[in-house]
Amino acid sequence: AQSVTQPDIHITVSEGASLELRCNYSYGATPYLFWYVQSPGQGLQLLLKYFSGDTLVQGIKGFEAEFKRSQSSFNLRKPSVHWSDAAEYFCAVGILIQGAQKLVFGQGTRLTINP
Amino acid sequence: GAGVSQTPSNKVTEKGKYVELRCDPISGHTALYWYRQSLGQGPEFLIYFQGTGAADDSGLPNDRFFAVRPEGSVSTLKIQRTERGDSAVYLCASSLYGVEQFFGPGTRLTVL
């Protein structure tokens, strides 16, 4: 069955420090991979997505992620975090269903930023 | 343009009652999805509509849950005989051509 694992439930980093959030997936075919961010009281916002091609994908707000098929991973990175990046981050794999995609999410990583 | 909207934003009900949650997708989006997010968890897929028909309802937990989209736009998620375990945030998303899903702010359902 398809699944997504985010090993870190909560991460704290200092403002200006680099960030890496881990994501591992289980899926039999070529995966469609996503990272979403959820701020308190807000809906999910798409940060970036991987469908095919270049394994390093750039997203909004200075985020990037790298798809590594051999490790079944799709880790999210940012070179220097800002206080406004504090939020919950979700990795997801897209399962094709009749022309659309059903998303299977990980349980999320809560990011806290120290000033 | 307007994003996905959901009403109500909060709903408190008593065990055993019936509730309806509404989703207004982005205009022109043919695909509509419902997810449920329990506290401390990621969203879980419930049902997907393509146009007016439910193309995949494999995520509905039991027959107390039902969703409709009669005119291919607005959708309503209906929960009968609510239970405390139904308490969660219910998220709606829409997409065009099944690529990027745009999420609404969710409806927080509390069953007392």
Image (cartoon, grey):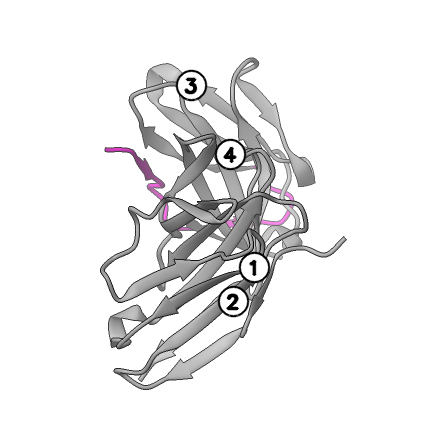
Residue B29, quarter of the rendered image: top right
Segment tinted magenta in the rendering: A1-18
**Between marks 4 and 2, how big is the CA–CA gap?**
33 Å
Q: Mark 2: which secondary structure?
A: strand
Tell which subunit mark 4 falls on. A
- Residue at numbered disc 4: A76
Between disc 1 and disc 2, whose residue precedes?
2
Left or right: B23 as drawn, with respect to B55 = right
**Mark 3 highlights which residue?**
A68
Residue B84, quarter of picture: bottom left
Q: Nearer the viewer, residue A106 or B91?
A: B91
Q: Position of residue B59 (x, y in %)?
A: 30, 49
Q: Position of residue B17 (x, y in %)?
A: 31, 83
- Relative image position of residue B64 (x, y in whole percent): 26, 67
The subunit letter for the residue under badge 2 reads: B
What's the CA distance linking mark 2 and mark 3? Answer: 39 Å
Residue B22's label in the rendered image is 2
Mark 2, Cα crowd under 10 Å, few <14 / some 14-19 / many 20+, is: many
Question: Looking at the rendered structure, which numbered label has been put on residue B2?
Answer: none
Give the Cα separation between the discs numbered 1 and 2.
Answer: 7 Å
Q: Amino acid at mark 3?
A: Lys
Q: Find disc 1 in the rendering and name its residue.
A: B74
The residue lying at 45 percent from left, 27 percent from top is A32
4 or 1: mark nearer the eye: 1
* Cβ atoms under marks 3 and 1 closer than 8 Å: no
Nearer mark to the viewer, of 1 and 2:
1
Depth check: give the residue in front, A61 or B88: B88
